[in-house]
Structure formats: structure tokens, C-alpha cells
Image: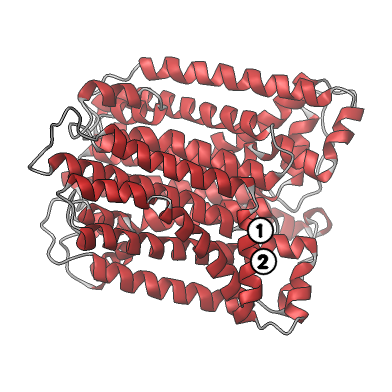
Amino acid sequence: MMTILRRELLAILRSPRSAAGLVAVALLCAVIVVARWPGAGVADLSGGAARGVFTLFAWGLLACVLLLAPAFAAPSIVRERIRGTLLLLLNSPLSSPAIYAGKFFAVLAFVALVLSASLPAAAGCLALGGVDPWRQVGVLYGVLLLVAAECVAIGLLASLRAASTDGAIRATFAAVFALVFVTLGPRFLTQGQPGPVALAADWLRRLSPLPVVMEITGRGGAGGVGLAETGSAVPPFFLAGGLLCVGLAIATLRQLNHRIFDRSRDAGRITDDQSLAVRSARRLFFLVDPQRRSATIPRWLNPVMVKEFRTRRFGRLHWLLRLAAGCAVVSLALTLAATTGTVAWGVEMIGGLLVLLQVALVVLIAPSLASGLVAAEREWGGWNLLRMTTLSGLRIGVGKLGSVVWTTLLVLAATLPGYLMMVVIKPTMASQVTLALVSVLLAMAVTIAVAAAVGSFFSSTTAATVTVSLVLLAAYLLPLGVWAFRDDPFGHRFVETALMATPLAAALAAIRMPGFTGYDLVPGAWWVAGTVIVAALTIFALRLRRLLLPE
């Protein structure tokens, strides 16, 4: 195990991304403390200022762990398989548990090193007073280490199952997002109800670190909404998190053997070669049949866009239709919740959840597709083939961006039935829904443009995907983090200015979700989004022009 641990840890530490992560965490934590440090000999004897600083420090550190741990764990195994070294490892005297433990603890050791860079800022929080060194700071670091262990375990399992590094990163971040946010959803729907379903939902939300950090920072109970929560959320979180790590480790070890190289692929059958009865039945069940022969590309259609759809797995329509069907079911289920047992939430709250669902889908899907538009071609040698064609840079750029735009629009369109039901329930919300949809479309455009522009600077798909994911998650989460601490320590004007930076906040304010009704973000946030879109597309166009020039 120590051999793998040493090799993996040295490889991580030699990466420029690890050095950037360490410096960024240290600077972020230092800025949080220094910005609120009392000056001119004035101190807050009540400890309110210190608790506010500690709250910002805790949430900032949690965001860093959730961004860094999956990014370094996800490529770990799939990169070995692509390079051909995983088979050598499995044929070595090292056992599968030793290989897994070495990779697991290497990433966990790097995360611990990142957390150690925040210790001076933690000491500053303690020096301000009002913060318990063991019950708050000590427990916080224990929670963060367990969150990191969960992210690493998820990343290693996704890396084992994925066929490419960007696919592993995409699956890992999606699973981490579900762990942090989606696990809280069933509890909101079943809170206060008896029965095994409510009990299962209660234990499911124990997997999320959000209620625990809220309890540590004194910002709430154990994740309840509207009802008093009894007991601490910390012991159940450690129990549930530990069981999750063990379960993921067992699932990974069961597959970490020579059999992963013997996966058989279904040869498939062409629908056009089957009988008339089979073809007629498939026409009844499939709007678009993925087993038909691909038709020729017409002259009016961009060939680069068609090429993108046909060469990536996620671009195939049967995968998109499955995802769209799932999104439609979720949106209708949320709307149904507004008319049944959860009517006390209000239609505005359900509308806000639909907006969050849409933007979450955009942030999860669009970056993984747009970040590799140029990087994947350069990494696998396809860019030189594009340069030798007669296609102009404008046609190449429009085709690549169009493949991402149409894919994302299809997913967003699947959530529209929920909005339609909201308007039927409350017709006065038609204007609010319209403004919210415009804001969501702008969020989609911003995400795709920024992902394409940032990804065009890389020649590796993995580096492009990780960087774009970090940039976009920070761009969406930082304004919402400022909003979470409105009135203490941030004032109304500062929060409104910060929310102008993201169209997500504009959509939530337009739909009048509770907590956002006091902020006037439309059309100011639209102008900011438009400026970002124009700037990002300009950078993307300049990069395409530069890359298409002869070497």
C-alpha cells in the first residue's frame, strides 16, 4: 500500500493544480479572517463577529473540499487503464485492497494537507473569541475529513466504471451534488409524517454535510424545515458517512480485478434489418429509434454539429430522451407536491425548486460537454483533421456550440410541464414564470459560453473539465454564499450587488422564491449575463482563429 500511496501522492503534489489549490485555500481562509478582523483597538465582546467569521470560514472550507477532493480522485483509476498501467498493477504482488487503499489515502492525505493550510485562519477565528476550539473547530475538521473520504470513495468507484477521464469527473461531480443536495429533498417532503418512508428519508439526509455544518456554525438545527429538531446531527452523520465509505469501498474492490478488462459489448442489431412487425412496434415505443442507420448529412445542416452528436455517447438521442423523461417526471412530481400534502410550501417555493433543478442540470451537463469541444480534439488528434477541411472557423465554432446548446435545451424543455402546471394552479404567476425562464436561458448561455472559452485554452480534456467545473461552481456558489449570510455580516446592498453576478439569483427573484423577494435583480443581472456571454464568445472565437492558423 505504501508504494502506491507514495507514488500517487507525489504525482498529485507535482501537479500545478495541487499547488494552485493549496495557495487558493490558504488565501481564501486568510482573506475571510483578515476582512473581519477588528481594527483601531475595538473588539466585539459578545462574540457575534467571531461567530460570523467562523461561519464564513466553515462554509468556504467545505466548498473547497467538495471541489478539490472529487477532482483529484475521479481520474485516478481510469487514467491507469487508459495508459495500460492498471493491468501491470493487478499483475504485481500488490493485492486489490492495497491498490485501493494506496489511492484512497493518497488523495485523502492531499486533502488533509489542504486543510492544514487553513489552520492559521482557524487560529485567527479562535483568537477572536466566541468559538469553541473542540465542539466547533475540532468537529468541523472531522466533518470535512469525512466529507473528503466520501468524495474520494465516490470518485474511485466512478473512475473504475468510467471509460474516460472526463466521464469519470462528470459522474463524480454529479454523485457529489446528489450526496450534498438531493439527499435533503425527501426529508422536505416527508417531515413530520410517520412511517418507514419518513424514517428512510430522515436517515438519507444524514449523508449530507449541510445540516451538520449548519449546526456547528449555529445557523440551524439538524436540517429541519419549520419544525424543531431534537438531538445533534453530528453522530448520525459520522455513522452514515462511515457506512457509505465502507459500502463504496466494497463495491469498488469487488470490481477491481482482471474481469474489468473482459467486459463484453452488445453488438446490437440494426432496426432496418428486422421484420416489419418489430419495426412497427419500435415506431410505437420510440420517437427516435437509436438503432436505425444514420442518414446522410444534408447540405443545410452543420456537419461539425452532426459529428459531435454521433461521436460522443451522451450526444446520442436515446440517452438524451431518457434524461429528458426523468427530468419531466421530477418537475411534475414537484408540482404535484404543491397541490397535495406540501401545499403549505406555496407555489413560489415549488417554482424556486424547479429553477434550482434546471440550473443544476445546466451546471452538471453543459460544462462536461462544452469544456472538451476543443480540448478533446487537440488531445486525440482530431483538431489537425478539422484544420485540413474546407470548413471555416465560424462554421466549426457554431457547429460545436450548437451541439451543446441543443442538448441542453432538450433537457430544459423536459422541465417545462412543471411550470405549465404552476400557471394552471395559479394563473397570476405567468409573468413570473416568463421572467424566470428568460433568466434560466441566460444562465444556460453563460455556462456554455464560459465553458467553451475556458476549455479552449487546454489540450487535455481532464484539465479542461476540472478547471471549467471549478470556475462555474465558484461563479454560482459564491454569490449564493454571500446571500446565505445576508444581514450578518453582509448588508442588503452588498448582497444585491453580489447576486447581480449570476442569472440564477435573477430567476429565483423573478419567481419570488422566499428569501429573494427583497432584491431587484431584473434586468440588471440580465445585462451582466449578456456582457459575460459576449466576452466569453469573443475569447472563444479568438482562440479558434489562433488554433486554426498553420503551425
Instruction: Please give left or right for residue 105 compared with residue 286 in the image.
Output: left
* 197 to 318, vertically: above or below: below
The residue positioned 50% from the left and 43% from the top of the image is 23
The residue furthest left is 46
Q: In which quarter of the image is the N terminus?
A: bottom right
Label disc, if present, on residue 439 of the rendered structure:
none
Q: Is mark 1 on a helix, strand or loop?
A: helix
Give neighbour class at mark 2: few <14, some 14-19, many 20+ (Cα, 10 Å): few
Determine which quarter of the picture holds residue 360: top left
Residue 362 appears in the rendering = no
Q: Where is residue 50 in the image (x, y as percent from the top left)?
A: 19, 43
The Cα atoms of the two marked residues, 2 and 1, are separated by 6 Å
Q: What element carries label 2?
A: helix
The residue positioned 77% from the left and 57% from the top of the image is 276
Give neighbour class at mark 1: few <14, some 14-19, many 20+ (Cα, 10 Å): few
Instruction: Please give left or right for residue 129 compared with residue 501 in the image.
Output: left
Q: How is the image coloured?
A: secondary structure
Residue type pointed to by label 2: Arg
The residue positioned 13% from the left and 50% from the top of the image is 226
Q: Position of residue 532 (x, y in %)?
A: 52, 20
Q: Mark 1 points at which residue?
A: 11
Q: Which of 401 and 43 is in front in this view?
A: 43
Q: Nearer the viewer, residue 63 or 354?
A: 63
Instruction: Please give left or right for residue 61 compared with residue 483 in the image.
Output: right
Residue 160 appears in the rendering = yes
Residue type pointed to by label 1: Ala
The residue positioned 40% from the left and 43% from the top of the image is 357
Label disc, if present, on residue 7 of the rendered structure:
2
Q: Quadrant of the C terminus?
A: top right
Q: Where is residue 507 in the image (x, y as percent from the top left)?
A: 36, 28
Whether the residues at callouts 2 and 1 have beta carbons within 8 Å, the answer is yes
Q: Where is residue 144 in the image (x, y as percent from the top left)?
A: 37, 59
